[in-house]
Image (spheres, helix red, strand yellow):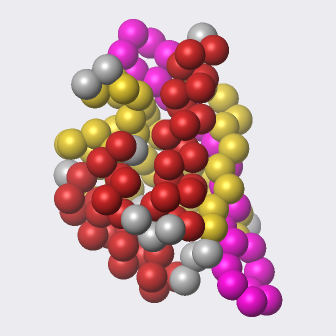
């Protein structure tokens, strides 16, 4: 992966961490997901389309009371205008609630010249 691509990927993931989760600004998802993105959350129905994904994340962040998330890319491969990321993340909660670890796969796609999440799936670690 080129340094420029690595920086773009890191920046998009930071938007999710810092703006979407920490500040609860689901409007920032316009800069994270493609317009026709799909998410496959654990134990829930598939959600398609950025506006539906915004509704999902607004409800999930509030319901779970997530205070922050820390993402780490384990591997990233590129094939033309598509990228494939395997990563892990830690969800943090207020007070003394224990952290939760997850693993994820994101298929990235270039949209309007920017790398964005196109397909997003995650599962809890045991």
For image coordinates 39% across by 10% down, the residue present is: 80
Q: Is residue 57 visible?
A: yes
User: Is residue 62 placed above or below 80 in the rendered structure?
Assistant: below
* Residue located farthest toward the bottom when viewing the structure as drawn: 95
Quarter occupied by residue 91: bottom right
How many numbered discs, if any? 0
For image coordinates 63% across by 62% down, the residue present is: 69
| The stretch drawn in magenta includes residue 95 | yes
User: Is residue 32 placed above or below 109 in the rendered structure?
Assistant: below
Q: Is residue 105 visible?
A: no
Pinpoint residue 118: horizontal percent, then vertical percent: 34, 38
Quarter occupied by residue 72: top right
Which is nearer the eye, 28 or 72? Answer: 28
Which is nearer the eye, 75 or 115? Answer: 115
Pinpoint residue 22: horizontal percent, then vertical percent: 56, 67
Q: Which residues are magenta?
A: 78-99
Pinpoint residue 59: horizontal percent, then vertical percent: 36, 78
Q: Is residue 85 left or right of residue 29?
A: right
Which quarter of the figure is the N terminus placed in?
Answer: top right
For image coordinates 52% across by 82% down, the residue present is: 64
Which quarter of the figure is the C terminus placed in?
Answer: bottom right
| The stretch drawn in magenta includes residue 98 | yes
For image coordinates 60% across by 23% down, the residue present is: 6
Which is nearer the eye, 86 or 50? Answer: 50
User: Is residue 82 placed above or below 124 in the rendered structure?
Assistant: above
Q: Is residue 1 left or right of residue 117?
A: right
């Amino acid at each position: 992966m080129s340094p420029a691509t690595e920086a773009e990927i890191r920046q998009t993931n930071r938007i999710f961490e810092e703006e979407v989760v920490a500040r609860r600004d689901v409007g920032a998802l316009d800069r994270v997901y493609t317009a026709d993105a799909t998410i496959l959350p654990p134990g829930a129905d598939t959600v398609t389309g950025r506006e539906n994904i915004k509704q999902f994340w607004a409800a999930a962040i509030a319901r779970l009371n997530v205070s922050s998330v820390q993402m780490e890319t384990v591997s990233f491969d590129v094939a033309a205008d598509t990228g494939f990321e395997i990563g892990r993340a830690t969800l943090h909660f207020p007070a003394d609630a224990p952290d939760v670890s997850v693993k994820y796969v994101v298929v990235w796609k270039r949209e309007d010249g920017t790398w964005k999440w196109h397909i997003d799936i995650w599962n809890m670690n045991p």
